[in-house]
Image: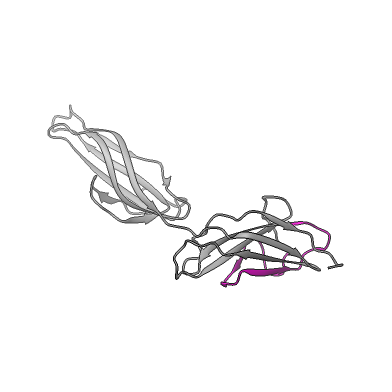
Amino acid sequence: GGRFVSEPVCLSETGATLSSIEVVENVPSQTEIEYFIRSGENCFNWNENYPTWEPINPGEDVAIEGKYFQLAADLFPDGGGKTSPSVTEIKLFYEVEETPLPPYRVKAVAGNGEITLCWDVAIGFGNSEKLGYYIYYGEKPGEYLGTVATEGNSPIFVDSTESSYTISGLENGRIYYFAISACPLSNPDLQGELSTEVYARPSSRL
């Protein structure tokens, strides 16, 4: 007998819904196994009792949401303490939240101390869902750590369905790199993948 607890498992960075678990177990006569699960958006402040452990039965349908999931099981031996149940495998079945496709045909047009980004909206995420955008920018390819734009630090959230945006306060002569992700306005935390990277160099001559 005894208890085992798994490490927290991140099923999806965008969130997931656990639908059921299946186990490979051996439960001899007079023994028993009880399973438990808990979930949350992060696991950094978890302790022995938080979040609350919820009982779960293998094969039963559930709908438990979160990014991180953790499993535990209590194994009860027979009355004489000589025979114990065992678990050799646990499978988690879950669905991942759909995220918007990244914008495509992204274009960066340089100006005087500013760069205007234009893009085409990708199709395929909820016909009636309005999208917002996160604009990532920086001074090195693939490193979007920009802090100089008048509109704010990277990423800049565009709370609009427009498909163009001007970033100002940039240094003329310096090259800047950009990538854009889409998100539903109803849930801005549900970001999709980044678009293809583009770049431009503002100039006082433009």
Q: Quadrant of residue 181?
A: bottom right
Residue 91 % position (x, y): 32, 41
**How is this picture coloured?**
one colour
Q: Is residue 50 visible?
A: no
Depth check: 149 or 129 in front?
A: 129
* Image point (12%, 34%), residue name: 30
Q: Is residue 70 visible?
A: yes
Q: Quadrant of the N terminus?
A: top left
Residue 10 % position (x, y): 44, 47
Depth check: 76 or 63 in front?
A: 63
* Image point (52%, 63%), residue name: 183
Left or right? Give the position of 188 relative to 57. right
Residue 63 % position (x, y): 31, 56
**What residue span does the magenta drawing correspond to?**
149-176
Depth check: 118 or 146 in front?
A: 118
Depth check: 94 or 58 in front?
A: 94
Q: Quadrant of residue 76?
A: top left
Left or right? Give the position of 188 relative to 77. right
Left or right? Give the position of 23 relative to 190. left
* Image point (31%, 35%), residue name: 89
